[in-house]
Image (cartoon, helix red, strand yellow):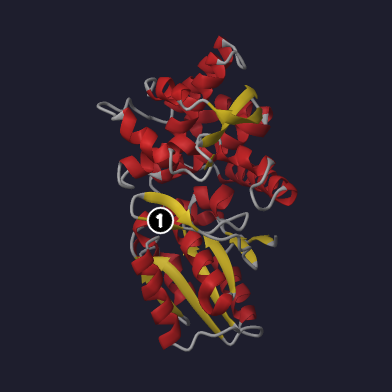
């Protein structure tokens, strides 16, 4: 996995120009809200650009078909390069297109969100949503390179920054108690304005954790499953709210449920559980009034981690240590969902 941290937009421009020596054509896939960012126009100007639907609405079969037709009409071929410029939805989509167009062409990820920088763009997972089922179709397809330019974070709303912190807190809870302590002690100063020195340190820490896990288990058969902490419920909530609830916010609720069930299972004590919920609550999540629990559970039944009607569910042994509970009793999830 080739990850490059770049500190100026001019250097990214030069980096992309170097691709012209290797590839005959370069295509960008991005979204309308990203094109509005002032620095982005200089990146896109020399290249063909496909602007896909906003947020998760880009990860549909119809959007996929439109991109394939666009690429074919502009003579994209086996020696062309796709570049995803955007958040996790764009990198998911672009990676899937790249893995299937002409049976596979190269692609590069340039994540523009905190969530993309610390998690979504790394590890080779690509996906489309089918109807209200999230990530039901996908491939494992590593990007040729991932370029991190953290100044894109200046353009993000507070909500988008919080989305990223959901995944950062996930890494802290499943494998890095020191990271948890650091976030807990600084949470009031982490969201806005962004402390770039501090965020650089966090991005690098999360990148290292993700790379370590993916190297051990690229195709999600074992330890990589711990990266799904909070995601079983999180994905179900995203589907339940028809993708109007952001991925990060879904994961925050999902981590609250998983932490409660870890506490209920006597894996973590009251003090640890309180620390986790207090930290998550400081990011501004509110109670989900009128939640139809049976409907959320029906989405969980279509989750990829639900195999033969048996659920592999991620729980905590401690802050900084997660494990996979195989054949988890889904009735427990009902009790967990009642806490949010």
Give the mark count: 1
- Check the image and report above or below for 259 versus 205: above
Q: Is residue 333 visible?
A: yes
Asked if residue 191 can be seen in this view, the reply is no
Q: Nearer the viewer, residue 217 or 15?
A: 217
Q: Is 142 positioned to the left or the right of 167 in the image?
A: right
Q: Nearer the viewer, residue 58 or 225?
A: 225
Q: Could you say where residue 94 lies in the image, as x and y percent from the top left?
A: 49, 66
Query: In the visual, does 64 lie left or right of 264?
Result: left
Relative depth, front residue between 249 and 57: 57
- Residue placed furthest toward the front: 308
Q: Image point 38% across, 33% down: which residue?
A: 297
- In what element is the residue under mark 1? strand
Image quadrant where one finds the N terminus: bottom right
The image shows residue 235 at horizontal and vertical percentages of 43, 42
Quadrant hosting residue 192: top left
Q: Is residue 258 above or below residue 160?
A: above
On the image, the x and y values in percent for residue 71 come to 44, 81
**Residue sitting at x 55%, y 28%:** 328
- Which is nearer the eye, 165 or 74? 74
In the picture as drawn, the residue positioned furthest to the top comes out as 270
Dot 1 crowding, Cα within 10 Å, few <14, some 14–19, many 20+: many
Q: Is residue 35 depicted above or below 340 in this figure?
A: below
Q: Quadrant of residue 19?
A: bottom right
**Residue sitting at x 32%, y 40%:** 240
Is 277 located above or below residue 13 in the figure?
above
Q: Which residue is mark 1?
A: 129
The residue at 37%/21% (across/down) is: 338
Q: Position of residue 141 (x, y in %)?
A: 61, 63
In-image side of 123 versus 128 (left or right): right
Location of residue 315 by image quarter: top right
Classify the position of the C terminus by image quarter: top left
């Amino acid at each position: 996995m080739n990850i490059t941290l770049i500190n100026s937009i001019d250097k990214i421009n030069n980096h992309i120009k170097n691709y012209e020596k290797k590839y005959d054509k370069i295509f960008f896939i991005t979204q309308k809200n990203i094109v509005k960012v002032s620095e982005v126009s200089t990146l896109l100007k020399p290249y063909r650009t496909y602007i896909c639907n906003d947020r998760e609405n880009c990860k549909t079969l119809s959007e996929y078909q439109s991109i394939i037709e666009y690429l074919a009409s502009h003579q994209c071929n086996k020696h062309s390069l796709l570049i995803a410029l955007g958040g996790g939805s764009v990198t998911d989509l672009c990676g899937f297109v790249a893995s299937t167009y002409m049976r596979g062409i190269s692609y590069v990820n340039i994540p523009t969100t905190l969530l993309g920088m610390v998690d979504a763009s790394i590890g080779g997972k690509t996906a489309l949503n089918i109807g209200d089922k999230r990530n039901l179709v996908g491939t494992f397809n590593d990007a040729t390179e991932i370029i991190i330019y953290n100044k894109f974070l200046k353009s993000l709303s507070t909500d988008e920054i919080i989305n990223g912190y959901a995944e950062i807190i996930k890494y802290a809870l499943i494998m890095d108690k020191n990271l948890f302590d650091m976030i807990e002690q600084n949470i009031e100063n982490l969201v806005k304005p962004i402390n770039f020195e501090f965020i650089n340190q966090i991005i690098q820490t999360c990148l290292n954790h993700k790379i370590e896990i993916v190297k051990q288990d690229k195709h999600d058969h074992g330890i990589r499953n711990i990266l799904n902490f909070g995601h079983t419920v999180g994905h179900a909530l995203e589907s339940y709210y028809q993708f109007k609830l952001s991925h990060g916010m879904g994961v925050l609720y999902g981590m609250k449920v998983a932490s409660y069930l870890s506490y209920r299972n006597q894996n973590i004590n009251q003090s640890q559980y309180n620390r986790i919920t207090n930290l998550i609550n400081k990011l501004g999540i509110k109670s989900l009034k009128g939640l139809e629990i049976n409907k959320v559970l029906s989405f969980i039944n279509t989750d990829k981690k639900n195999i033969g009607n048996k659920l592999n569910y991620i729980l905590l042994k401690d802050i900084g240590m997660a494990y996979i509970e195989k054949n988890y009793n889904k009735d427990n999830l009902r009790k967990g969902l009642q806490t949010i």
